[in-house]
Amino acid sequence: MEKVVRNLIEYNGISTYTYSTKNFRQFNIEQMDNISNKRADVDQILKVWVETKVIDTEVIKTPIGSSTEGQVATGKKLLVCGDIDIKIEYVSCDTVQNIYVENFMIPFGTYVVLPHNFNEHGIVSATIMVEDISSIKINPRCIYNNITLMAIADIY
């Protein structure tokens, strides 16, 4: 995992792994997260950590065809469900300027189109890679998180 610093915020959890596959789907998760009433207001975000966990996968049958834009539906998709765990470290607005860590959990669901020759009796597993993270303080009680992810289906 890589550490990236942008606009004085350190982002942790971005994948550095180079992966070669045809079975993937990129997707974004956007969410406005409110700071818990037990915590002080946000002055400045310092660090953000993101971890993903795949909870369930299922191969489903879908229609077969292709669109005029070039998208192909092969008749099989891997549904992937999981959680994104976000930890945000920030400096509070109070005079002492304490440092707090706030946790957010975001459930997600996505799919990966499987190839035409996919064997229903084969083994398939999913990996979720974090490609990019961006967190912005909207106001002292609200943080906007945008996470770019890649779902990868490994077929054995």
Image (cartoon, grey):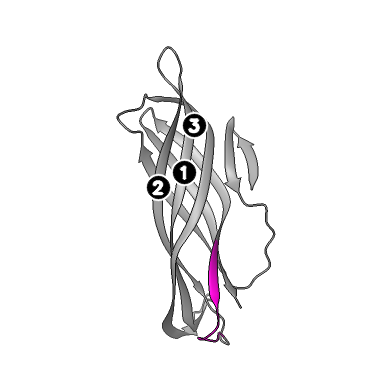
- Considering every residue shown, the one lying at the far top of the view is 95
Q: Nearer the viewer, residue 54 or 2?
A: 54
For image coordinates 41% across by 58% down, the residue present is 108
| Front in this rendered view, residue 122 or 129 | 122
| Circle 2 residues within 10 Å: few <14, some 14–19, many ≥20 | some
Q: Amino acid at mark 2?
A: Met
Marks 3 and 1, how far apart at CA = 10 Å
Q: Give the number of the disc on residue 86.
A: 1
Residue 105: give its label: 2
Where residue 91 sits: x, y (%)?
47, 23
The image shows residue 132, relative to residue 80, as above or below, that is above
Q: Main secondary structure of the magenta part?
A: loop
Question: Type of residue at label 3?
Answer: Glu
Task: Specify start and end residues of the magenta stretch as a single range.
Answer: 118-127
- Decide: is 129 above or below 99: below
Q: Give the image location of residue 101, x and y in percent.
A: 45, 32
Closest to the observer: 38 or 152? 38
Q: Position of residue 37 (x, y in %)?
A: 30, 30
Earlier residue among tags 2 and 1: 1
Kind of element beneath mark 3 = strand
Residue type at numbered disc 1: Ile
As drawn, the label of residue 89 is 3
The residue tagged with tag 2: helix, strand or loop? strand
Residue at position x 65%, y 45% from top? 2
Is 132 displayed left or right of 108 in the figure? Answer: right
The crowding category of the residue bearing disc 3, from other C-alpha atoms within 10 Å (few below 14, some 14 to 19, many at least 20), is some
Q: Is residue 119 magenta?
A: yes
The image quadrant of residue 17 is bottom right
